[in-house]
Amino acid sequence: MTQPVRVWAPFPRVVELQANGRRLAMTPGESGWWTASPGPAPGSDYGFILDGAGPFPDPRSHWQPNGINGLSRVLDQDAFRWTDTHWRAPPLSTAVIYELHIGTFTAEGTFDAAIEKLEYLAGLGVTHLEIMPVNEFSGARGWGYDGVNLYAPHHIYGGPDALKRLVGACHGRGLAVLLDVVYNHLGPVGNHLGKFGPYFTKRYSSPWGEGINFDGADCGEVRRFFCDNALMWLRDYHFDGLRIDAVHAIFDASAVPFLEQLGLEVQQCEALLNRPLVLIPESDLNDPRLIWPRTRGGFGLDAQWSDDFHHALHAVLTGERDGYYVDFGALADLAKALRRAFVYDGQHSIFRRRPHGRPPTGLDGRHFLGYMQNHDQIGNRALGERSSHLLNTGRLKIAAALVMTAPFVPLLFQGEEWGARTPFLYFTDHQDEALGERVRQGRRREFAGRGWAEGRVPDPQARETFERSKLDWSEPFQATHADLLNWHQRLIALRRNEPVLCNGRMDQVEVRYDETENWLVMERGPFVVGCNLGPAARKIRLCPGDCRVALSSMPLDQSSNGAVELPADSVVIAIRPG
């Protein structure tokens, strides 16, 4: 027997179901819900007619085979046969995360094609994949952050069953999977939620338009929509956790904010599923309350992206000081990031022109993700340059060593491990020509203000911009790339084999540095990481007494009286005696 169809639509006076060539009046119920029974069978296409207009896709559509403006298709979530019954993700504290974008990770750009690279990723040593948003969005190509059908995996990537095959294949190879979700806005094209009910509010606005109604009248069903979406990915697609995009753009003055409610519901879901689940928000507020326990007045989430570590490391290695990098650049900033996660924990920010942040007192590094690159830090540059475009191999190895030995959960962006030379550009495929032109001109204006000639800024709507961003899988076999790949493999193996490097104890991190001579030494338990960022070789004292070299980016002699001669732009990881 087919299930009834339900839709929350308090705005229209009349709602009809269109399915199988027929229109059927739906019955109004309590709190703005409408019902039609029996509903269409699995595999049937359907939509909703609102006061005579439409049909519009189901706001909770699980399948959009013809894109954002097509009819929804009934999906039987229970029909897929899983083989990962006994899977349990490893603890986040021991994770090495690999961020990827399905459309550019392989030449084919599909879920099934990504499966073919899983043996490589397992061999690299990563433990978790973090997949950029995959819900339905405008056109055939995009980053995924302008999605509208939040419950439907993108049809170009392969649709629902293909995504399930990918997650199942990851688990079969010992890889956990995290999904990037966007709960702060929806895309401008195909966004029909406002026709159904009060999903949006004029009381708040974001860079993408009206804010989501998380705390106004009738917000209960809006919050239910987003919480149920999160639970669907975890329950029906077997994801091991979610990365929540830009939570600083979620405006909510509730006594129990949406993010806290989400954390509680995911915790309950974890108990029902009997497997660990994690929530990792992204925020630029440097606010530890996101991950403080609820008993302390926090939201009780698991970890957050830590941009201060990235900014401090990037500014030291590249010398860039434009934009938000104006607040960074000294070794003192990098040293504080390694010891405290937040460089800005209440002091004045030149870039923001105000005090910024709050001390993360009582938290350890396991609650922060540390990285040298991610999709934002690459793709939001005019030319999508990776660190491999900005740094020599020596400095890339220094960056990798600090990311992998810092007290945080390390994250790599696809291809970073071999120094990929393909850019990761900002690309879109809006079918609305007027919107596409606005995006194109907006991108050019943004970078014109930073001194870029319009002709040098790649057209985000051009297919070539997307194609240039695809990884070149022949690169890892080339000598220079293979050397960097080997370096990452050795670093990951070291981290995974040495529990002290996963303990997150920032209170046990010691950092010494010299701004003039441009060197930095970090100590974590028996491990000492020495970095020479200067233009000439320099003898650096690592520790009292001799120590054993575990890894070095350049050939080195064993230390003599705790000192090593480090070439320019090189790093050594040593183990102290005892």
Image (cartoon, rainbow, N blue to C red):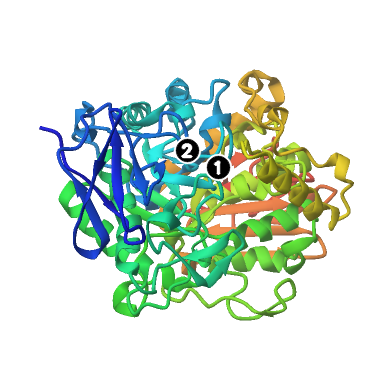
Give the image location of residue 304, x and y in percent: 47, 60
Whether 549 is drawn above or below 314: the answer is above
User: Is 385 on the left or on the right of 134, as rendered?
Assistant: right
Residue 234 position within the rendered picture, expressed as x and y whole percent measured from the top left:
29, 45
The residue shown at (81%, 42%) is 457
From the viewer's perspective, tell me whether residue 525 is left or right of residue 63.
right
Separation of residues labelled 2 and 1 (CA atoms): 35 Å
- What x and y, as percent, mark residue 401? 60, 46
Q: Amino acid at mark 2?
A: Asn
Please tell me whether mark 2 sits on a helix, a strand or a loop: loop
Residue at mark 1: 412
Name the residue located 37 percent from the left edge and 65 percent from the top edge: 259
**Residue 357, picture quadrant:** bottom right
Question: Could you tell me the amino acid type at mark 1?
Answer: Leu
Please name the residue that numbered disc 2 is placed on: 69
Residue lying at 54% horizontally and 49% vertically, measured from the top left: 187
